Amino acid sequence: MLYPTAQSWLDAPKRRIMLFGMSGLGKTHLSNMLRAGGGWFHYSVDYRIGTRYMGELIADNFKREAMKLPLLRELLLSDSVYISSNITFDNLAPLSTYLGKPGDPEKGGLPFDEYLIRQDQHRSAEIAAMQDTAHFIARAEALYGYPHVVCDTSGSICEVIDPYDRDDALMAELARHVLPIWIKGSEAHTAELIRRFDRAPKPMYYQRDFLTGAWASYLAETGTAPDGVDPDAFVRWTYARALAHRAPRYEAMAQNWGVTITAEEVAAISGTDAFVTLIASKLPS
């Protein structure tokens, strides 16, 4: 562990951490708070995925749709208009839109094979973005003089590593540079995340074996043909199962490489000093 004791964490002139857990439990909120408190550089993995590694795919998808309209087609072919995404730390809609949902094309669904291709693209992009963490730690200090760095991960990090293998190459490398911190939600948080998702179902990345199993089970359970699936109904049905699938994986990550804090503790943090104290309380004395 990068900081083996509470005192080593408190005395560290440079604190480097990695927040992980389900989206909606406070990773980006906490990252923004640390950045606003001064001295912390915020590295957003989702932002890196959507700009550096999938930005061209996202923009090309926009252009593909625009080319279906005669006016925009003419303007694009003459280089008269420019189309790009406007991803921010707080608005990842272009990335979600590109990932899409499988099912009925009349309801905005993708053919399942195309959906899997985009899922695989996200997996490769997420791994590459995580591997960039050390680069951004060095860059934050060399360019901007930031001593502290928070890596704000995607909710799907537990799907692109093997959380049960202490020798997992990606996690072993990350643990050399950051202290992994799991933000753990309660049953009430899980229920609220599901309610929130039901109101506005969004595309997300799933581990391939989990996804193909869920798709086969959904088709069998509903008796629906692949091109007749309601995309929103499928992702709603899948989401609660994804939360249950990920929970033990996050827990194993925390046990093997890091520490655990709760979403309630995150909500109660009043500033940077309180955060530093909280993490110290989770480390051996």
Image (cartoon, helix red, strand yellow):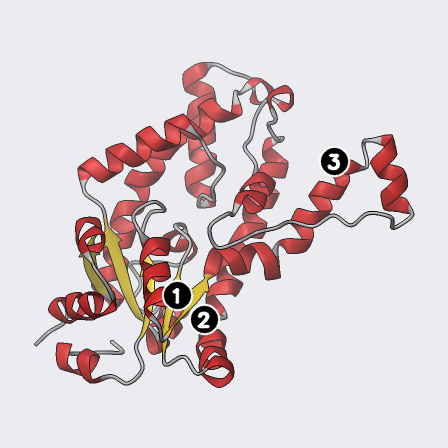
* Residue 162 locus on image (x, y percent): 36, 58
Can residue 67 be seen here?
yes
In the image shown, does 52 or 115 lie closer to the viewer?
A: 52
Residue ID for mark 1: 151
Residue ID for mark 2: 133
Distance between the Cα atoms at labels 2 and 3? 34 Å
Number of marks present in the image shown: 3
Element type at mark 1: strand
Residue ID for mark 3: 65
Horizontally, residue 9 falls left or right of residue 241, namely left
Q: From the viewer's perspective, is residue 23 above or below residue 43? A: above
Q: Amino acid at mark 3?
A: Glu
Can residue 237 be seen here?
no
Element type at mark 2: helix
Q: Quadrant of residue 237?
A: top left
* Residue 96 locus on image (x, y percent): 54, 42
Element type at mark 3: helix
Q: Amino acid at mark 2?
A: Thr
Q: Amino acid at mark 1?
A: Cys
Q: Residue furthest left?
A: 285
Image quarter (top left, top right, bottom left or bottom right) of the N terminus? bottom left
Q: Are marks 2 and 3 in contact (CB under 8 Å)?
A: no
Q: From the viewer's perspective, is residue 246 above or below residue 148? A: above
Number of other residues with Cα within 10 Å of mark 2, as a class: few under 14, some 14 to 19, many 20 or more: many
Which residue corresponds to the image point at 33% horizontal and 57% vertical from the top-left?
Answer: 20
